[in-house]
């Protein structure tokens, strides 16, 4: 396939990845506010789509980390490798969405790149230091979210200990509109940049740009695609995130969204990619534990943890197989 067609294939697949990421991860931004009935599903999705777009336009630090810290020398990486990485990641995302598993789109993308690069030019081409930094941020972020979510919830319960549950729910249902908006904006600020980074890596490896800078058209394309994907909804995973981990009241939903958005904003500021799925899940578990440890459905949490652990190796394997198939064409 001619190189100019391959670069457009990368762009289209990266945009498709962001679209899938949008409907796959819609639950991250709106599950808590929908499950507590703070906002209707339709209005929640419109809000999330709009703020996902806005968040995606504010920074490119995470995109540069993804584009610059996965491989040592972008010129060694063919466009076929990037095509295979994106296809493998998309396949795993759609599979986990179908089975209602809130897995990480970030993990699947990193795994896709690792698998395709390893099978094409060898593991030595991978930037182990950069990948280690990315994986550590992906692993530590839900742990941090769980711990901070626990203390945020403890603090709220102490501050409002003299209020009746009915009054609390009524007031925090209104405040959830603010926290859900912050969550949707932070989601766009981190997640949409991952596809931007992959497109920039392809442009750099193909000689279309000279430095790891994100063109404005790439930002707009990825932000728009994620917003459209979010508007398509993600009802299968919303049910898991919103009700099956922990049955939340409005104060819990507010705490989960606020805590998650703070963790994600911090990571974006540090130019670190995180899994918004992991962060929100960790927040919900921490907040549920603050109420009562047994109130958290740890069986669901274990299933999600298994999905998190296997995502990188499985998406890497899928992308490696796809690259081998493409190399035979």
Image: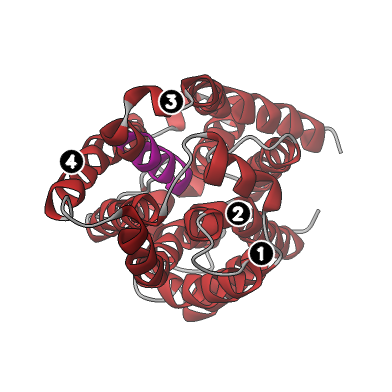
Q: Is residue 270 left or right of residue 58?
A: left
- From what the image shows, is residue 127 above or below residue 160? above
Q: Between 259 and 244, which is closer to the camera in this rendering?
A: 244
Which label sits in the foreground, 4 or 2? Answer: 4
Q: Is residue 298 left or right of residue 60?
A: right
Q: CA distance from mark 3 to mark 1?
A: 35 Å
Badge 2: how crowded within 10 Å, few (<14), some, or many (20+)? many
**Main SS type for the magenta part?**
helix
Q: Between 130 and 33, which is closer to the camera in this rendering?
A: 33
Lower sequence index among marks 2 and 3? 2
Tag 2 secondary structure: helix
Q: Between 196 and 147, which is closer to the camera in this rendering?
A: 147
Badge 4: how crowded within 10 Å, few (<14), some, or many (20+)? some
Q: Residue at x 47, y 80 (%)?
A: 216
Which residue is identified by label 1? 229
The magenta stretch is 275-286
Lower sequence index among marks 4 and 1? 4
Which label sits in the foreground, 3 or 1? Answer: 1
Location of residue 125 in the rendering, given as x and y in whole percent from the top left corner:
45, 32
Residues under numbered marks 4 and 2 in contact, where contact means CB atoms less than 8 Å apart? no
- From what the image shows, is residue 174 above or below residue 282? below
Location of residue 165 in the rendering, given as x and y in whole percent from the top left corner:
32, 53
Lower sequence index among marks 3 and 4? 3
Residue 151: give its label: 4
User: Any magenta on residue 321?
Assistant: no
Which label sits in the foreground, 4 or 1? Answer: 4
Which residue is identified by label 3? 124
Q: Residue at x 31, y 40 (%)?
A: 287
Which residue is identified by label 2? 21
Lower sequence index among marks 4 and 2? 2
Work out which quarter of the rendered image holds the C terminus and state it: top right
């Amino acid at each position: 396939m001619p190189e100019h067609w391959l670069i457009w294939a990368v762009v289209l697949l990266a945009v498709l990845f962001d679209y899938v990421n949008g409907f796959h991860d819609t639950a991250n931004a709106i599950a808590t506010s929908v499950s507590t009935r703070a906002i209707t599903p339709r209005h929640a999705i419109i809000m999330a789509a709009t703020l996902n777009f806005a968040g995606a336009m504010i920074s490119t630090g995470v995109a540069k980390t993804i584009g610059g810290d996965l491989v040592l020398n972008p010129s060694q990486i063919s466009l076929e490798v990037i095509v295979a990485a994106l296809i493998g990641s998309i396949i795993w995302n759609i599979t986990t969405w179908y089975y209602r598993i809130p897995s990480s789109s970030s993990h699947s993308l990193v795994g896709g790149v690792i698998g395709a690069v390893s099978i094409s030019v060898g593991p030595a081409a991978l930037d182990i230091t950069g990948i280690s930094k990315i994986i550590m941020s992906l692993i530590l972020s839900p742990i941090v979210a769980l711990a901070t979510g626990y203390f945020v919830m403890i603090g709220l319960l102490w501050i409002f200990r003299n209020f009746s549950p009915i009054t609390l729910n009524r007031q925090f249902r209104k405040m959830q509109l603010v926290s859900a908006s912050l969550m949707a904006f932070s989601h766009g600020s981190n997640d949409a940049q991952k596809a931007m980074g992959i497109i920039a890596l392809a442009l750099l490896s193909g000689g279309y740009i000279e430095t790891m800078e994100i063109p404005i058209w790439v930002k707009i394309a990825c932000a728009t695609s994620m917003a459209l994907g979010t508007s398509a909804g993600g009802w299968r995973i919303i049910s898991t995130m919103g009700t099956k981990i922990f049955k939340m009241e409005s104060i819990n939903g507010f705490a989960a969204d606020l805590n998650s958005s703070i963790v994600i904003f911090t990571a974006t500021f540090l130019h670190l990619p995180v899994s918004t799925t992991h962060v929100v899940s960790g927040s919900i578990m921490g907040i549920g534990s603050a109420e009562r440890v047994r109130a958290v459905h740890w069986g669901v949490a274990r299933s999600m943890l298994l999905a998190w652990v296997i995502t990188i190796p499985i998406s890497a394997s899928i992308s490696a197989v796809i690259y081998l198939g493409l190399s035979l064409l």
